[in-house]
Image: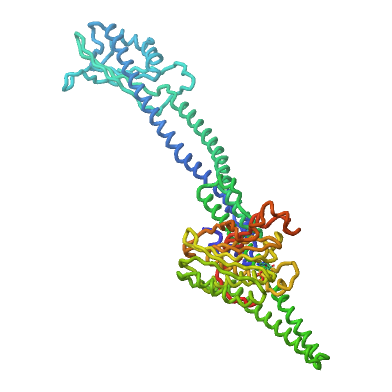
Amino acid sequence: MTDAGRPDAPKPDPMGGREPRDTRQAGRRTPVPQSFQTRLTISFMAVVALTLVLVAPVVVIRLNDYFRAEEERRLDARANASAQILQQFIVDLAGDKPVVREVDGKLLLNPQVERLLVGGGLQLVADRVAEADVRVVFGVASPDTTGMLVPNPDPALTYTATTQVTPDPGQARDPAIPDANAETGRANAVQDWGMVVTLSDPYTSRASTLAAITGLLMIMAALSLVVSVGVAAFLAHRFTTPLTRLTDASRRLADGDFTSRVATDELSSGTLELRALSTQFNLMAARLEESVEIIRHDRDRSRDFLADVSHELRTPIAAMRTFIELLQGPAARDPAARLEFLESSAVQLDRLDWLAQNLLELSKLDSGLVLLELRPDDVRGTIESAVEQQHDTAERKGIRLSVTLPNRPLRFRHDPPRVGQVVTNLVGNALKFTPRGGEVRVSARAEADGGARIQVVDTGIGITAEELPHIFDRFYRGAQSSEARSSGSGLGLAIVKSIVDMHHGTIAVESRVGVGSRFVVTLPPDPRLVTEVDAPPPDDDASWPGAAVAGPKMDVSSPSAGSPLNHDAAPLSMTAGQTDPDRPTAPEGSSAPR
Ligand code: ADP
C-alpha cells in the first residue's frame, strides 16, 4: 500500500509544493524506506537472503544423507572383509578339528582359535581392517532352504575388540552410522560352523566434511549477500537515475523553464520503457515550448498590431478634429476654405473607412473564421475584371495599363473573388507607385503542373533591398516619402499574402529602384492536394524593364540603379506556412479602392 492510500498519509500540496519534501517527512514517521532506490536494494537483498536461507539447509541435509549412505556402504564392505579374513585364519588354524565344541551342553570355542582372537588377532582386524569396534559371535551353522550355511550365533561365544588406531585428521567416531553385520558359514570334516561379525562406531570424516562444507556455504552466503547489496544498489541506482532526471526535468518545466529536457545521452542508460517515457517527455516539452513561443509571439504581435491600429486611426481623426476646429473658427466665414476643409475631411473619412475594411478583413483572417470557396474556374475572367476596375485610375494618372492572357481557358481550382482581390491589390499598388507616363502590365499563363502564374509588372519607383523583406508586414509602408506612399494603409500586401497562402501558392517579388517592380503569384492546380510549397523564383522575363537593364547596362542607369539589384540579390519569395508561420490561413478578400 502506498502512503497516499493510508488515512494519515500527507496530502499533496495543491499549490504545487514539491512532493519529495512531504514524503521525506512521512519517512520520519514510518520505518518503511521511502526512496524507490532503497526499496529496490532492500527487496533485492531480501530475495537473495531468502534464497540462501531456503537453499543452504537443503544442501546440507542432502550432503549429510549422501555421506551417511557412503559410510554405511563402506562399513558393510569392511565388515565383509573382516569376516573373510577371520574365517580364513580360523580355517587354517582349526584344520579338521571342530571350531565350536559342545561340552556339557555348553558351546566352547576351539582353544587355538580363542587364543588367536584374544591374543591380538581380533584387535588387529579391528585396527587395520575394520577401523571400527568389532564383535564376533560364533555358533554352529545349518543350511537354509537354498543350501547356504547360516550361522546360529551363541551369545556365550562373543568376542569383541575396540579399535585403538589413531584416527586420520578430520576423522572421528561416528555413532550415527548403524552397525554393519557380516555372516559366514563354513563346513569342515567334523562340523558346520559359522560366525556373525559386527562392526560399530567406525571412524569417519563425515561430520568434519559436513562442517567444512557448511562453513564454506556460510562464507559464500555472506559473500553473495555482500555482492548482492552492491549489485542491487548499482542496479537500483542505474534504474532510478533516469527517473530522477525525468523528475528534475519536469520540475524545471513546472518552474517555467520550457527549455528543460532529459539529455539524450542519459536516455541510453535507462530501460526501454524509461527511454520511451523520456523521449515522450522531451517531445511533449518541445511541443509545449513551441506552443508557449507561439502564444508569446502572438501576444507581442497583437500588442504591436493594436499599437499600429491606434496610431493609424489617430492620424485621420486628428486631421478631422483640426478641420472641425478651423471650420468653427474663422474658416466658417470663408466659403473657399470651408469647401477645402470639407473635402479634406471627406478624404480622411474615406481613409478611415478603408482602414476599417482592411482591419475587419485581417481580423477575420486571424480568427480563421473564413474558408476559401474553391471551385474549378477560368481565372482569365477574374483577372480581366480586376484590371478593368482600375482602368479609370490608370487613365487619370496617365499610365498604360495592359493585360495579356492566354487564348485557352486557364482553369484550375481557386476562389475567384479572392484571387481577384490579389490582382486588384497588386495592380492598385503598381498604379500607385508608377509615375505618369509609366506602364503596368498584367499577364497570366498556365503552369506545367496545371496551376497558374499571374504576373504584375510596373515601371514604377521600385523598392529598395532593405524594404523588400518587409513589404508583406502589416502596416508596413515604404520609407521613401511620397504622396503615393503616405496614402496607403500598409495592409494591402498582407492581405494578398494571406490569400495566396490560403491557396497554398507562392508570391515572389523582384524590384529595382527607379526602374520598376515585378510581382509573381503562383497558384497550384488544386490547393487541397498541396502539402508542401516550394516557392519557384520568378523566371526571367524580358518584358520586365528591370531584366533589360541587368548586367553591363547597369552603369548607365540612375545612381540608385547602380546599387546591387534586388533582382541580383536573392529575390524575396514568401511561401504560405514556411517563411511566415504566423500568417493566418483563412482569408477573405476585400476591394482596395485608392
Ligand atoms: P500600401 O497600402 O501602403 O500600399 P501595401 O501593403 O500594399 O500597403 O504595400 C506595402 C509597401 O510596399 C508600400 O508602402 C510600398 O512601399 C511597397 N510597395 C508595394 N507595391 C509596390 C510597387 N508596385 N512599387 C513600389 N513599392 C511597392
Does residue 141 lie above or below 563 as drawn? above
Q: Name the residue furthest bottom.
A: 333
Nearer to me, 118 or 24: 24
Q: Position of residue 476 (x, y in %)?
A: 69, 68
Taking the image as shown, residue 127 lies to the left or right of residue 328, namely left
Nearer to me, 565 or 290: 565
Point 57% across, 45% down: residue: 238
The quadrant where residue 578 appears: bottom right
Nearer to me, 141 or 65: 65
Q: Position of residue 69 (x, y in %)?
A: 36, 27
Residue 359 appears in the picture as rendered: no
Q: Position of residue 325 (x, y in %)?
A: 80, 88
Image quarter of the C terminus: bottom right
Taking the image in four quarters, ligand 1 sits in the one at: bottom right
Q: Name the residue furthest right.
A: 330
Taking the image as shown, residue 529 lies to the left or right of residue 576, namely left
Q: Position of residue 5 (x, y in %)?
A: 53, 62
Nearer to me, 203 or 453: 453
Colour theme: rainbow
